[in-house]
Image: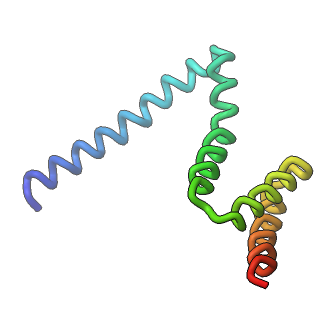
Amino acid sequence: MTTAQWLLIGLLAAGTFAIRLTGLFVGDAVERRPALRAVLHDLPGCLVVALVASSLAGASPQAWLAAAVALAVAAWSNHVILTMAIGVGAFIAIGGLLQT
């Protein structure tokens, strides 16, 4: 291996270690500050909404209708697997209805 490759491996290892070490120190700060705890509690939901919104940006009406069905199921049941199963089923069913 070349020197550049070893340097890259060393930098990536140092970066990984730094991220883990920072997490230890930041974790203590989060426990002491309720505002940070609230932000981190809501973060996964915000990320899911951002991913779904970006995937629906150029999607077909079939995808939008299936997403609306999945949203209704999620609000009603608060069950992730049920929401995904019914959302996929709605996408397939709506696709069949739109083609006929």
Quarter of the rendering occupied by the N terminus: bottom left
Point out residue 69 in the picture as x, y percentages from the top left corner.
82, 59
Nearest the eye: 69 or 97 = 97
Nearest the eye: 42 or 23 = 42
Which picture quadrant has residue 63?
bottom right
Q: Which residue is at 65% across, 47% downward?
A: 48
Nearest the eye: 70 or 83 = 70
Point out residue 75 in the picture as x, y percentages from the top left corner.
86, 47
Q: Residue furthest right?
A: 76
Q: Which residue is at 81% across, 78% downward?
A: 97
Quarter of the rendering occupied by the C terminus: bottom right
Left or right, 91 with respect to 75, comes to left
Point out residue 33 in the picture as x, y percentages from the top left corner.
63, 14
Point out residue 61 in the picture as x, y percentages from the top left corner.
70, 64
Left or right, 2 with respect to 30, comes to left
Left or right, 18 with respect to 34, comes to left
Q: Residue furthest left?
A: 3
Which picture quadrant has residue 43?
top right
Colour convention of the picture: rainbow
Q: Residue furthest bottom?
A: 100
Q: Tell me if residue 6 comes above or below residue 30 in the rendering.
A: below
Q: Tell me if residue 21 comes above or below residue 67 in the rendering.
A: above
Q: Tell me if residue 17 comes above or below residue 30 in the rendering.
A: below
Left or right, 22 with respect to 76, comes to left
Q: Which residue is at 29% across, 39% downward?
A: 14
How many numbered discs, if any?
Answer: 0
Q: Which residue is at 42% across, 31% downward?
A: 21
Which picture quadrant has residue 73?
bottom right
Nearest the eye: 67 or 36 = 67
